[in-house]
Amino acid sequence: MKKVLIVLALAALGCGSAPESPAPAAKTAEAPKPKPPDESRRFPKEGRTSMELVEDHALGKDYLPGGNVATYEKDGKSYRLILLVVKDPDTAALLSFEAKSHLEGAKLVPSFGGYFGMDGETPWFLFPKTNHLLGVVGLPQDEADAVAREFAARVQ
């Protein structure tokens, strides 16, 4: 009789049976992306006409995250500088490489480890530096190179 009671008690507790599957977890809403940091202090002031903090898709490009975009007027020319903060140097390098596939005639600029090419009629020069992706948009390569060197010196 004791054995029967023990068996019945164990059966009632579910011992020896397959564990129940946990209920499917409720789908949680995706956490909002953090706002890009304001890095305006890293941009040259001379010739700057505007400064913007873009939450996502800098310069309207779906392959670029959000970041800082400044517009310049200098010597009768208009151009933009971009600075995007990413999680690490590898991500910056991968973003630079990704941008290459979106630029016509993109070529490697070995001294920067980045790429220069055309987006329609607009020249683009994008390059990684530490955990940043920097860019000069709107200047021919020789002029973009000089501006990029000065800009890169401001980013650690």
Image: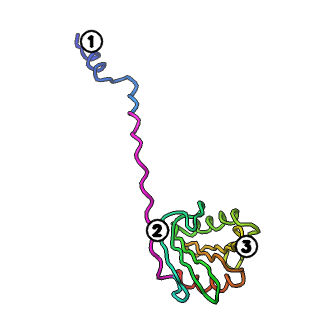
Q: Of the two numbered discs 2 and 3 on the same chain, state the one appearing first in sequence.
A: 2
The answer to whether marks 3 and 1 mark residues whose Cβ atoms lie closer than 8 Å is no
Q: Residue at x 56, y 79 (%)?
A: 71
In this rendering, position of residue 155 left or right of residue 27: right
Quadrant holding the N terminus: top left
- Across and down, in percent, residue 122 comes to 69, 72
Mark 2 residue type: Pro
The colour scheme used to paint the residues is rainbow
Q: Which span of residues is magenta-colored?
A: 23-42
- Helix, strand or loop at disc 3? strand
Q: Could you say which is closer to the camera, residue 114 or residue 5? A: 114
Residues packed near mark 1 inside 10 Å, few (<14), some (14 to 19) or many (20 plus): few
Q: Is residue 105 magenta?
A: no
Mark 3 residue type: Leu
Q: Which mark is residue 43?
A: none
Q: Quadrant of residue 124?
A: bottom right
Q: Which mark is residue 108?
A: 3
Q: Is residue 32 magenta?
A: yes
Residues packed near mark 3 inside 10 Å, few (<14), some (14 to 19) or many (20 plus): some
Residues packed near mark 2 inside 10 Å, few (<14), some (14 to 19) or many (20 plus): some
Mark 1 residue type: Val
Task: State how far apart marks 2 and 1 are (Cα).
Answer: 68 Å
- Across and down, in percent, residue 67 comes to 51, 70
- Across and down, in percent, residue 129 comes to 58, 76
Q: Residue at x 64, y 73 (%)?
A: 126
Q: Could you say which is closer to the camera, residue 15 or residue 130? A: 130
Task: State how far apart marks 2 and 3 are (Cα).
Answer: 27 Å
Q: Which mark is residue 36?
A: 2
- Helix, strand or loop at disc 2? loop
